[in-house]
Image (cartoon, rainbow, N blue to C red):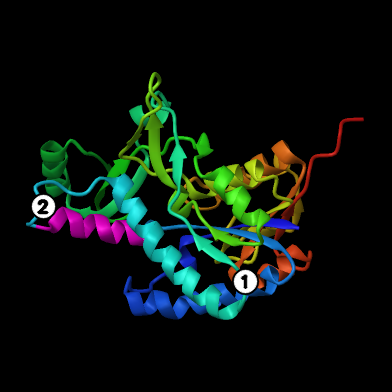
Amino acid sequence: MRIVIALGGNALLRRGDRPDAVVEEANIDRVTTAIAALAHDHEIVITHGNGSQIDLLAVESDADPALSAPYPLDLLGAQTQGMIGSLLFRTLYDALPGRRIAALVTHTLVRADDPAFEHPTKFVGQEYPHDIASELARERGWHIGADTTGWRRVVPSPAPVRVLETDAIHDLLGSGTLVICAGGGGVPVTADRDTGALTGVEAVVDKDLTAALVAEHLKADFLLILTDVPCVYTGYGTPDQQPVLGTTPADLRRGGFPEGSMGPKAEAAARFVERTGGLAAIGALDAAYEIVHGRSGTLVRPDLPAG
């Protein structure tokens, strides 16, 4: 079976962890254990989040006095793909002796006229007091928005159209290679309408929607979205919280899950199942093997035909 595994950003940095390299290196063992159990029997493609890492790099770039301007987000995203890809490669290389493994920096095509460019929504970087955030917005042309305890930069999150390295990933899978790709949703690029030339853009593509697109285009059998909760819950965090163990795309969308957490995961799972007829699941990293074998998580299956 061909499985695309979408690792949440908390796979390397759990809630409350300091963003130190030693912390990420320690946490990577959990990822390796979860994935290696599946890799023995299945074709595996791994995608991953990068929220904490790109926030850290953005803060460092903003504050670096040696730079005349901060690095753009597309290049910071490429840096996080290289860093996280290297950590995953090294641990999986040790855990799966003899298995071919490739970590790719991949690029995600987005439309230059995507409405998201007119309505930035994705937080990046650190929180600032309102006066400092406003000054930075004026100096650097940023959009800002109120976050939990302060103000942060907000950037567009355009819809992924295609991961440009999909054919290369397909060929690698055909040779028995485990592929790590599409980190953080991929490096966002637009293509010139006349020449096809690529240009990086100041945006962040949703990692789960990109994972669903990769799974669709690779004709995967299963999209496995791993996070830090055992399954999807309705009324999460309230006295009415209830687990959702089996569902369909239509029912999942009716759950009204928040955009900042479970919403994109639910939408990604629903899209993949609708477009391919395959299966998707959402659940905890440490239960990856059990989720694929139907013993944990939320399984999303195709809607039954009418009548």
Q: Quadrant of residue 188?
A: top left
Residue 237: x %, y % from top left: 55, 61
Residue 213: x %, y % from top left: 59, 42
Residue 120: x %, y % from top left: 34, 36
Q: Which residue is mark 2?
A: 67
Q: Which mark is residue 190?
A: none
Given the current orientation, which residue lies at the most extreme right position?
307
Q: Which residue is mark 1?
A: 99
For image coordinates 26% across by 59% down, the residue present is 57
Amino acid marked by disc 1: Arg
Quadrant (top left, top right, bottom left, bottom right) of the C terminus? top right
Quadrant (top left, top right, bottom left, bottom right) of the N terminus? bottom right
Range of the magenta residues?
52-64
Q: Nearer the viewer, residue 208 or 14?
A: 208
Residue 295: x %, y % from top left: 77, 68
Amino acid marked by disc 2: Leu
Query: Does residue 144 appear anywhere in the picture?
Result: yes
Q: How many marks?
A: 2
Judge from the rendering whether residue 13 lies leftward or rightward of residue 163; answer left or right.
left
